[in-house]
Amino acid sequence: MLNKFLKNTNLDRTQKANLNTILSLFFRSGSILLSFILVPLTINYIKPDIYGVWLTLTSLIGWIAMLDIGIANGLKNKLSQSLAEKNYVQGKMYVSTIYVIISLLAFCLVFIYLIFYKHINWQSVFNSHFIPEKKLRDMVTIVAILFLLKFIADIINVVAAAFQMVAVSSFLLFLSNLGITLSVWILSLTKKDDMILLAYCLSFIPLFISLIASIYLFKNYFKDVKPSFRNVNFKESKNIVSLGSQFFILQIVVLIIFQSDNILIAHFFNPSEVTNFNVIYKYYSIIVIIFTVILTPYWTAFTEAYINKEFSWIKKAINKLIIYWIISLIILILMFLVSGWIIKLWLGDKIFIPISLSLSICAYVAVTNWNAIFANFLNGVGKIRVQIINAVIMGMLNIPLCSIFVKIFKMGTFSMPLSNFICLLLASIISYIQYNKIINENATGVWNI
């Protein structure tokens, strides 16, 4: 089915978006299922405390992904624009140059790591004195280097998105999870508690799949923009870096705002409340994941439509997404009504979730999805200055607002999602206003940057 999708170049923009959504939901569902299977397999293969170290390591490594300074999103927009204009020479230049920039960045990080890694006490970093220092250092080295190499190979996902084939990313993720799950299962049958082998399996397989996919896709489907050293042009590609730096600022601010809830809860209350918050958020986040899968294909579709001034198509697409949002809202309400029963069935009597916390997170998820509709459009057309201003203002308001709710109004743990809800609601209103200005072609000043 995916191969047929790749070969069919006669699909219009709407058909591509719909098919991408269906395929992405199918493969993403498979990936989620495999990830649930992988957790007990890995825990049974190594000790639970070692698995905790592994999770911490992969979380820290994941933050390194932010070091692309938003170049990936910049490439997505600029390449989409080149493809919409059928300017394949420019597109080839963008892809070739970004491969070189990301490669230089990745190898610089590898070089810096190799200079300092022996001087770091990794047992102290991970609070894991039960693991020999050398073994822990070797595991970190394997994961770090292979991840940074995958940093380069994953550019193929951005290129696929620019071609309005985001389902490719979901398919590659599914293959990676399938390969990892099978390899850990085989390891559990042959060896026990070998952290180095586990590190190789969990890090090399995704890299290998991305590399093979890159070679295959550039040879067969993306050959018009296949990278080459002859087409590298740092001067002409500065637009990507400039746009990417704005995405980077937006990513950092939003990450700080909405990843600080656990820290705030632990600070104002106690660590056990963090568990309650994460349990109920994980329950409602299913809707965020599904809605994100639906939205993703529209990013580059909006870019193409905006370049071609097809505003009527954009309006129809936004209206369709609003209908999807209404459906998601109805599902959220149903999930809230049965949340107590589901949590008890899932975790028994070990966890008690206050109705106020459940309701506030439910409301926060609803406004998150609403905001995502217009943020996705604005990202696609590259008008993100207002979003950056919104994010900075939210960053200044969020923590003080949490403090007021907790210390003055004694609202409890639902103060955090309530504060997030209020901040994001204000940003959503402004994003909706900007969307209307752009779509009606009367955006000026900061609204058009």
Image (cartoon, helix red, strand yellow):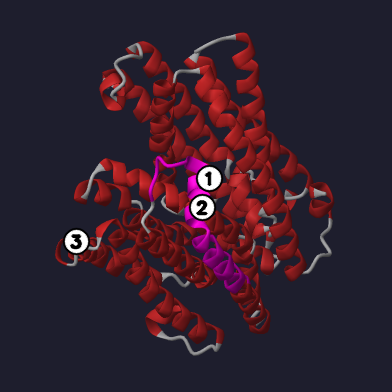
* Residue in front for this viewpoint, 80 or 172: 172
Which residue is at 27% across, 64% downward? 398
In the rendered structure, are the residues bearing label 1 and label 2 in contact, judged by CB atoms less than 8 Å apart?
Answer: yes
In the rendered structure, are the residues bearing label 3 and label 1 in contact, judged by CB atoms less than 8 Å apart?
Answer: no
Q: Is residue 422 left or right of residue 147?
A: left
**Does the magenta-highlighted stretch encompass residue 332?**
yes
Q: Is residue 263 left or right of residue 215?
A: left
- Quadrant of res 215: top right
* Residue in front for this viewpoint, 275 or 166: 275
Mark nearer the viewer, 2 or 3? 2
Decide whether the magenta segment is chiefly helix, strand or loop: helix
Where residue 167 appears, as percent x and y from the top left, is: 69, 52
Task: Read off the residue under disc 1.
Answer: 345
First along the sequence among labels 2 and 3: 2
Q: Is residue 364 above or below residue 3?
A: below
Is residue 237 among what the camera can see?
no
Q: Badge 1: how crowded within 10 Å, few (<14), some, or many (20+)?
A: few
Helix, strand or loop for disc 2: helix
**Does the magenta-highlighted stretch encompass residue 414?**
no
Disc tally is 3
Helix, strand or loop for disc 3: helix
Task: Read off the residue under disc 2.
Answer: 341
Where residue 26 appears, as percent x and y from the top left, is: 71, 50
Q: Is residue 266 above or below residue 393?
A: above
- Quadrant of res 447: bottom left
Q: CA distance from mark 2 to mark 3?
A: 31 Å
Q: Which mark is residue 403?
A: 3
Which residue is at 41% across, 35% downward? 61
Q: CA distance from mark 3 to mark 1?
A: 34 Å
Q: Identify the magenta region.
A: 324-352
Q: Amino acid at mark 2?
A: Trp
